[in-house]
Image (cartoon, grey):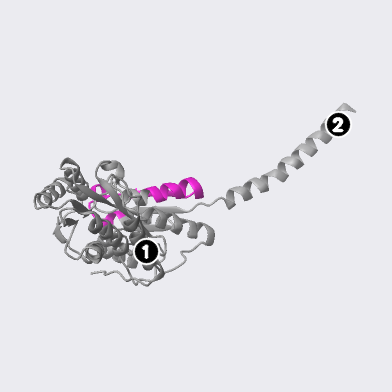
Amino acid sequence: MNKYRIFIFIVIFIFMLSGCVPAQKQAVQEKPNLKIGIMLSDAGLGDQSFSDSAFIGLEKARDELGVTFDYREVKDTKNYENGLKELVKQKNDLVVGLGFAMKEAIEKVAKDYPDQTFLLVDEVSDLPNVYNVTFKEHEGSYLLGVIAGLKTKSNIVGFIGGVDVPLINKFRAGFEQGVKDVNPSAQILVEFAGDFGDSKKGNVIALKMIQSGADFIYPAAGFTGVGAIQAAQSNKVFAFGVDSDQFFLAEDTIVSSMLKKVDVAMFEIAKQLVENKKIAKKHQLLGVAENGVDVAPIRVLQLNKQEKDQLDKMKSEITNGSRSVNEK
């Protein structure tokens, strides 16, 4: 009798175990297994701006969506093309080229691997397997220009660009228009560093502007801009951050930052792929209305009620389309 009971128990146990296995396999199959590879911009990780922001977005996708990702930097791969090819050979579902300078390389590699899906950030490619995300940097920069135009005491402000290309001139054009719309008599000093990774050069350019009377400095220059912010802090003038909220770099100096939400864009792209197995649109253009650009909280100085209302009104007008901002 005992042997019979043991036999029945073993049969039931085996049946239950076999019934659990398919459910376990199904759970594993349903777990997202999206792989993303990203080729970072020139400055790479630690730029406290563009590359770091993209990395943060992918970290969030990893933590919340189960995505895995890998990255390459120019210092390791010698050029963009090598890095992109390495990421393709890893069999990533999506290979990202971060930055406008990546366009030529990503198009070359995309032609060699027509079945691979690519994403180009900050430029536009017409190739069928390359998707694009760009931003209306001029809109966020306009709002910083308004702040500078309202609060400058010397009536001189400065803009420092990384390199003199159309993308960086969008930052410049928006900033200049914002200043002039509220303060037509203000003077705007402009200089391009020719480099996104040279903090010393940024420091020298900013110091020259400060000596010329500038009391606000807006660098759109990656790690070069960090040097400009440090010069502003050392000389007790105001500065703006760019791409991410850079207040922590100089808490007595950074009034606000132009938020170019690369982190949000990267997370949303990953989410689209996880949920729908495809990217929603061939080209996604993100501005104030699309929550792709904005300004960080205003710190260090205060706007009075009239100034705050004016800034809020101008932002609302950009959002609803009744106010246009120059791109160049």
Residue at 16% x, 40% y is 234
Q: Is residue 79 magenta?
A: yes
Q: Are marks 2 and 1 in contact (CB under 8 Å)?
A: no
What's the magenta region?
56-83
Of 14 and 67, the residue lying toward us? 67
Of 207 and 48, the residue lying toward us? 207
Residue at 19% x, 66% y is 184
Q: How many marks are shown on the rendered structure? A: 2
- Residue 96 located left or right of residue 203: right
Q: Is residue 207 above or below residue 164?
A: above
Secondary structure at badge 2 equals helix
Q: Is residue 182 visible?
A: yes
- Quarter placement of the N terminus: top right
x then y, percent, for residue 181:
25, 66
Give the spatial CA distance, label 2 vs label 1: 81 Å
- Residue 116 located left or right of residue 8: left
Mark 2 — residue?
5
- Residue 30 located left or right of residue 46: right
Determine the main secondary structure of the stretch shown in magenta.
helix
Residue 109 quadrant: bottom left
Could you tell which of marks 2 and 1 lies nearer the N-terminus? Answer: 2
Of 240 and 272, the residue lying toward us? 240
Residue at 72% x, 45% y is 19
Residue at 32% x, 60% y is 140
Of 252 and 100, the residue lying toward us? 252
Q: Give residue 107's mark.
A: none
Check disc 1 and give the amino acid type.
Lys
x then y, percent, for residue 132:
37, 65
Mark 1 — residue?
313
